Image (spheres, rainbow, N blue to C red):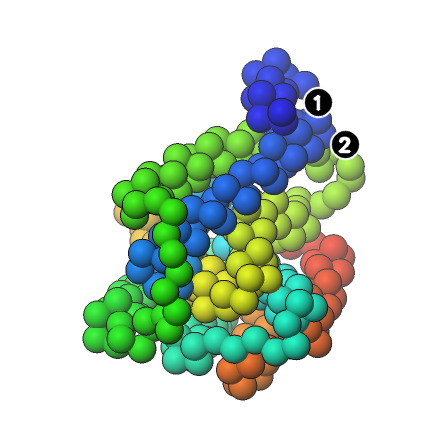
Amino acid sequence: LFMPLGWASHRFGWSPTSVFCLNFLAMIPLAAILGDFTEEVAAHTNQVVGGLINATFGNAVEVVVAVQALHANEIRVVQASMIGSIFSNLLLVLGGCFFFGGLKYKEQSFNSTAVTANMSLLALSSVALALPTPFAEYYEVHDDNVLVISRIAAVFLIFMYLQLLVFQLHTHADLFDDDDDTPTEMSSTAALTGLVVVTLVIAQLSDYLVGSIDGFCTESGVSRTFVGLIVLPIVGNAVEHVTAISVAMKDKMDLAMGVAVGSCTQISLFATPVTVLIGWATGRDMTLNFPHFEIVLFVLSVIIVSICVSNPKTNWLEGSLLMTTYVMIAVGFWFERVQEFD
C-alpha cells in the first residue's frame, strides 16, 4: 500500500516530511520478505554465509550513496554515514538481537570463532581511524601526511577483510557448518534472485528517503550531524535491523550475528577504505581523519561489545546494555556541532 504512495510522494513533489515518512513505512513490509530470503540462502549454505550475503546486499546501497556524496565533495556526509552505520549495527541492532531474543529464550549461544575474528578486525579498524589524528587537526584535510596515512591504512584494511573472507569461506569453513539441517522452501537461485530484487526496490525507496533529508532537517530543525550519524543509519538500515532481530527471535544467533557484526566489519574494513581509495582516484581528499569525539566513542563501543561477546552466550540484559549505550551516544551526537569542510 505504501510503496505506490512513497513513489508518488517523490514523483509529484510532496513535502519532504511526507516523502520521508511514506517511504520509511513502505520499507517495513519488505523487511519480512528480505528476512525470509536471507534465511533461505542461509539454509542452502550456513548461517555465517547467509549473514555475510545479507550484509553485503545491505551495505552495497550505502556504498553507492557514499560514492555519490563523495563525487559531490560531501566528505563530512560520507564520514558521518559510515561511522553512524557502524554504531547502529554494533550497538542498536546487536543489542536488539540480544534483547528480543533473550525475552523469548533465557540464553542463546553463537559461534565464538566468527565473532572473535570480526571483533578483532573492528579493533584493528579503530587503530586505522586513530592513526591520522596526531598528524593534523581535524580541519586540515589537505595535509599530505593525513592523506598518505589514510590511503595506506585503507589498503591494509581491505587486505585484512579479504583474509577474513578466505578464513570464513575456505580455510576454516568447516567451523561454521550448522548442526541442524533447516528444510528449504525454494532453490538457492530463487532465494538469491529474490534477495537481489527486494534489495534493489529498497535501494530505490532509500534513495527517495535520503533525498528528502535536507527538507526534513529544515522542517524539523534537527541538525545535519545528528541526521547523518543517527537518523540516516537507522532508516537506511531499517530492513537489515528487522531481519537480524527477527532471526534472533527464531534462535538463529549465528545468522543474526552475521548480519549485525558482519555488517560492521564490512563497513569499517571494506566500505570506508574503498571510499578513501575512490576519493584518491577521483581527486577528492577523503581521509580516515574523523572527529576525535567520534573515534573515542567508536573505540569504547568496540570494547563494550567485545566484553559482552567474550562469553558465547547471550541474554536480554546484555542487549539492554548495548541499546542503552547507543541511546547515550545519540544524546551526545545531538549536541555535537562539527564544522563542514570547505
Quarter of the image for the C terminus: give it.
top right
- What is the secondary structure assignment of the residue under circle 2? helix
Q: Nearer the viewer, mark 2 or mark 1?
A: 1
Could you say where residue 271 lies in the image, as x and y percent from the top left? 39, 55
Question: Residue at coordinates 59% horizontally, 62% vertically from top-left?
Answer: 249
Q: Relative to residue 272, is residue 166 drawn left or right? A: left
Q: Which residue is mark 2?
A: 219
Q: Mark 1 Cα within 10 Å, few/some/many (few <14, many 20+)?
A: some
Q: Which mark is residue 232?
A: none
Q: Amino acid at mark 1?
A: Ser
Tag 2–tag 1 contact (CB < 8 Å): yes
Could you say where residue 129 lies in the image, as x and y percent from the top left? 46, 69
Could you say where residue 182 lies in the image, as x and y percent from the top left? 39, 60
Q: Which residue is mark 1?
A: 15
Quarter of the image for the N terminus: give it.
top right
The count of marks equals 2
Q: CA distance from mark 2 to mark 1?
A: 9 Å
Q: Foreground residue, 183 or 105?
A: 183
Q: Foreground residue, 65 or 338?
A: 65
Q: Foreground residue, 146 or 165?
A: 165
Question: Residue at coordinates 61% horizontally, 13% vertically from top-left?
Answer: 12
Question: Residue at coordinates 54% horizontally, 86% vertically from top-left?
Answer: 311
- What is the secondary structure assignment of the residue under circle 1? loop
Residue 3 falls in which quadrant of the image?
Answer: top right
- Which numbered disc, 2 or 1, marks the residue that appears first in the sequence? 1
Work out whether residue 276 can be spotted: no
Could you say where residue 193 lies in the image, as x and y percent from the top left? 33, 39
Q: Mark 2 Cα within 10 Å, few/some/many (few <14, many 20+)?
A: few
Q: Amino acid at mark 2?
A: Glu
Question: Residue at coordinates 55% horizontally, 44% vertically from top-left?
Answer: 31
Q: Is residue 237 above or below residue 113?
A: above
